[in-house]
Image (cartoon, rainbow, N blue to C red):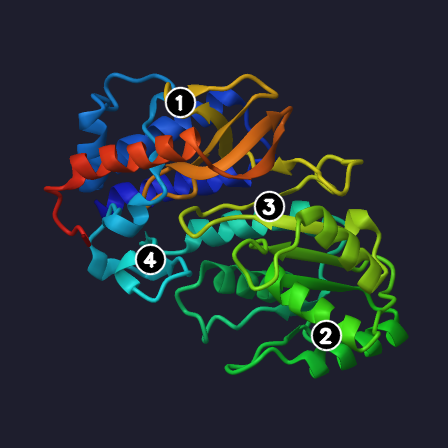
């Protein structure tokens, strides 16, 4: 298995390193990845067989069955023995470790390549390196957090030597951040503020209480991720960007959002720098060329026409060890080369997602290594 994995990994590396790819090239690579996952991921193979799908009887990646995202909480999805896992990323949001989504990685070579390649294009296309202020705990504090690893790679690859974290093991270091921002105002060196949405909201509240605001140097920017839903204080994305622009004196186009999830190995971004978006409050999200994001009719599992809302499905070639197709619980609308994220599934759409989970579990009950 290892030789097959290594060969496919080399093919994926070449694929990602291309400036762009067409639909035919993506489709062929997707079929190759599906063949590998069907052969080596026992739980996924059972699911495909229940759907009467195999590498022999499909010709297009949209025929590859996507796995409902909750399956990552309920069963083991891995194409290699778990003892060979180099990295395990787990979702947050529950105190029960058996109810967390788990994405097993044989290694992080493709994950890191995917992250670095598209981050550069989407966030800092005009800068080689930039001073980073990271508003999230370090990787050593949260070793199973995909976001902690993502931010570590960002800082390591694109941050200047004086880049800083502002979370200790115990607290968010607000005073330290205020001091460093004030220094940045004086020395005129651009900075990238990067981290979790809720960290920025907490800092905004602290600054409001103290009547503080900042004038960051030209070319400074902000990237948040994660959203504020379910937090102690919720804030709509449009309001968030407006408030960040005011707090840091940043142009709206320099306030960007990253959309990602533990169960994937690639990220999507606002298209401000990627496609010269002009609607900065609500730009379309864009995926890299090794990902296809499709808005689906959940009942028919058919692609929705442009402009019609449906459930978002991601086909991420970089998600090599688990499964390439992820059926999310997010609602979206496709728009040209990108998509709009509208929120979480409700009503019939949510029931459709639940049914997909039931179908997956029915196929996986006898699989070895299940966590249920």
- Which residue reaches farthest front? 347
Q: Earlier in the sequence, mark 4 or mark 1?
A: 1
**Does the residue at mark 3 contact the one at mark 2 (Cβ under 8 Å)?**
no
- Between the C-alphas of marks 1 and 2, the distance is 47 Å
Q: Position of residue 179 (x, y in %)?
A: 77, 81
- Between the C-alphas of marks 4 and 2, the distance is 32 Å
**Does the residue at mark 1 contact the one at mark 2 (Cβ under 8 Å)?**
no
Q: Secondary structure at mark 3?
A: helix
Give the residue at mark 2. 206
Q: Position of residue 202 (x, y in %)?
A: 65, 69
**Does the residue at mark 4 contact the one at mark 2 (Cβ under 8 Å)?**
no
Give the residue at mark 4. 100
Q: Earlier in the sequence, mark 1 or mark 2?
A: 1
User: Which mark is on residue 62?
Assistant: 1
- Between the C-alphas of marks 4 and 1, the distance is 28 Å
Relative placement, left or right, of 159 versus 90 is right
Q: Secondary structure at mark 4?
A: loop
Residue at left 26%, top 46%?
Answer: 77
Q: Earlier in the sequence, mark 3 or mark 4?
A: 4
- Between the C-alphas of marks 3 and 1, the distance is 23 Å
Q: Position of residue 13 (x, y in %)?
A: 46, 43
- Between the C-alphas of marks 3 and 2, the distance is 33 Å
Q: Earlier in the sequence, mark 3 or mark 2?
A: 3
């Amino acid at each position: 298995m290892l030789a097959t994995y290594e060969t496919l990994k080399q093919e994926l590396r070449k694929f990602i390193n291309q400036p762009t790819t067409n639909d035919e090239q993506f489709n062929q690579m997707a079929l190759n990845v599906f063949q590998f996952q069907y052969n080596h991921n026992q739980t996924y193979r059972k699911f495909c067989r229940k759907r009467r799908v195999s590498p022999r009887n499909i010709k297009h990646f949209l025929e590859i069955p996507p796995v409902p995202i909750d399956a990552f909480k309920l069963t083991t999805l891995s194409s290699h023995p778990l003892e060979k896992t180099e990295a395990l990323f787990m979702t947050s949001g529950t105190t029960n470790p058996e109810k967390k989504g788990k994405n097993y990685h044989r290694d992080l070579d493709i994950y890191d390549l995917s992250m670095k390649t598209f981050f550069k294009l989407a966030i800092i296309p005009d800068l080689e390196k930039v001073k980073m202020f990271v508003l999230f705990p370090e990787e050593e504090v949260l070793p199973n957090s995909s976001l902690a690893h993502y931010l570590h790679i960002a800082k390591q690859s694109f941050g200047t030597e004086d880049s800083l974290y502002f979370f200790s093991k115990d607290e968010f270091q607000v005073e330290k951040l205020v001091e460093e921002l004030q220094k940045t105002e004086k020395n005129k060196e651009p900075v990238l503020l990067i981290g979790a949405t809720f960290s920025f909201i907490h800092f905004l509240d602290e600054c409001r209480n103290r009547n503080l605001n900042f004038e960051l140097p030209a070319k400074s920017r902000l990237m948040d991720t994660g959203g504020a839903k379910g937090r102690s204080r919720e804030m709509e994305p449009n309001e968030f960007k407006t408030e960040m622009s005011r707090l840091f004196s940043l142009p709206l186009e320099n306030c960007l959002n990253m959309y990602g999830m533990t169960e994937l190995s690639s990220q999507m971004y606002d298209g401000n720098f990627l496609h010269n978006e002009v609607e900065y409050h609500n730009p379309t999200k864009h995926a890299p060329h090794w990902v296809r994001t499709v808005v689906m009719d959940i009942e028919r599992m058919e692609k929705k026409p442009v402009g019609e809302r449906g459930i978002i499905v991601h086909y991420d070639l970089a998600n090599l060890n688990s499964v390439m197709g992820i059926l999310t619980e997010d609602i979206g609308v496709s728009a040209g080369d990108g998509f709009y994220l509208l929120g979480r599934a409700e009503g019939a759409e949510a029931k459709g997602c639940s049914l997909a989970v039931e179908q997956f579990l029915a196929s996986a009950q006898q699989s070895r290594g299940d966590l249920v």
